[in-house]
Image: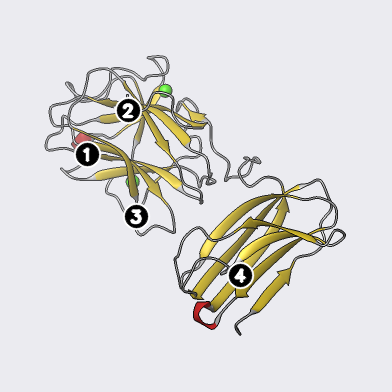
Amino acid sequence: MQSGSISRLFGPPLPGNQTYCLKFFYSLRGFSKSEHTLAVYLYNSTAQKHTRVWTPSDRTRDVWIHVELSIQTQNHTQVMFASMCKSFWNCGSAALDDISLRLGDCELPLGSPLSVPSRCDFENGLCGFTQEKKRDMADWVLIRGPTPTSYTGPKGDHTTGVGHYLYIEASLMLPGHSARLLSRPLRGSRAAQCLLFFYHMYGSGTGSLRVLLRSELEDGDVVLWERRGEHSVSWMRASVTYQYDRQHQIVFEATRGPSILSDTAIDDIKFQKGPCKDDGQ
Ligand SMILES: [Ca+2]
Ligand SMILES: [Ca+2]
């Protein structure tokens, strides 16, 4: 790009008074500063006005970054991508790909597989959760009543005491072996979200229970919550506030401890909008 030039890319004219979800990937190369690298505007051709609605929030270079943006149209609105080169010393190239636009807010669940499953008590199966099959050594077991081994695991589920829950059967696993349960792909949100669940860690050989966030954009799973060792003969409540603005999965990972007295269980998983009200309990 030459200095002092602006590159613009216009989308089609859109009907007014609608909310759209704009998605695209971009990649920046060069550019010594963040400003003017790339911006999304809503352009009103009648009034010849443009309003900036997005600029890159970080200085990452040379990788493709996914953006989801909710926009509100007025009459004769066009989406416009603009990249500016103000001076020779602050120029680079901005690349765009896979631009899509559809009706509806990006953050609101629309009944798609990306929407947040609000709760699961395991009374009707796994509610869209799935077992990790390749990268772990065991599966979570759906059970009702006590686990087969004495002095470990709950006597019954958390929901009603006589319902179902998930646990790892430690006597079928080796020390250090893990089982992972994956949520459906979840839509990201710029606002904080709250994950609530109940866990049961009773047994002198109890290992660990972790909640992980998995995203294609992260190198490995990110640990959001973790408990190790024996905790209580009762169910315990966990609340995890987290924020992630791109598609992701929540992973429940239980790891067997040194002995077979390490049946670890979970029940009543719930996702809520907004931060948890009683964090840390
Ligand atoms: Ca239950
Ligand atoms: Ca597994």
Above or below, 89 relative to 255 = below
Instruction: Assess whether mark 2 and mark 1 are in contact (beta carbons under 8 angstroms).
Output: no
Q: Distance between the residues labelled 1 and 2?
A: 32 Å
**Element type at mark 4:** strand
Mark 1 vs mark 2: give the one in front.
Answer: 2
Mark 1 vs mark 2: which is more N-terminal?
1
Mark 3 vs mark 2: which is more N-terminal?
3
Task: Quickly name the residue at label 2.
Answer: 280
Mark 3 vs mark 4: which is more N-terminal?
4
Is label 4 within 8 A of ligand 2 (CB to nearest ligand atom)? Answer: no
How many numbered callouts? 4
Q: Specify few, some or many for label 1: CA neighbours under 10 Å numbering under 14, 14-19, or 20 or more.
A: few
Q: Where is residue 144 in the image (x, y as percent from the top left)?
A: 36, 22
Task: Quickly name the residue at label 1.
Answer: 172
Residue positioned 77% across, 50% down in the render = 73
Is there any visible trace of residue 43 in the rendered image? Answer: no
Please state which amino acid type lies under the numbered disc 2: Gly
Task: Quickly name the residue at label 3.
Answer: 134
Residue positioned 57% across, 58% down in the render = 67
Mark 1 vs mark 4: give the one in front.
Answer: 4
Please state which amino acid type lies under the numbered disc 4: Asp
**Element type at mark 1:** helix
Mark 3 vs mark 4: give the one in front.
Answer: 4
Task: Quickly name the residue at label 4.
Answer: 97
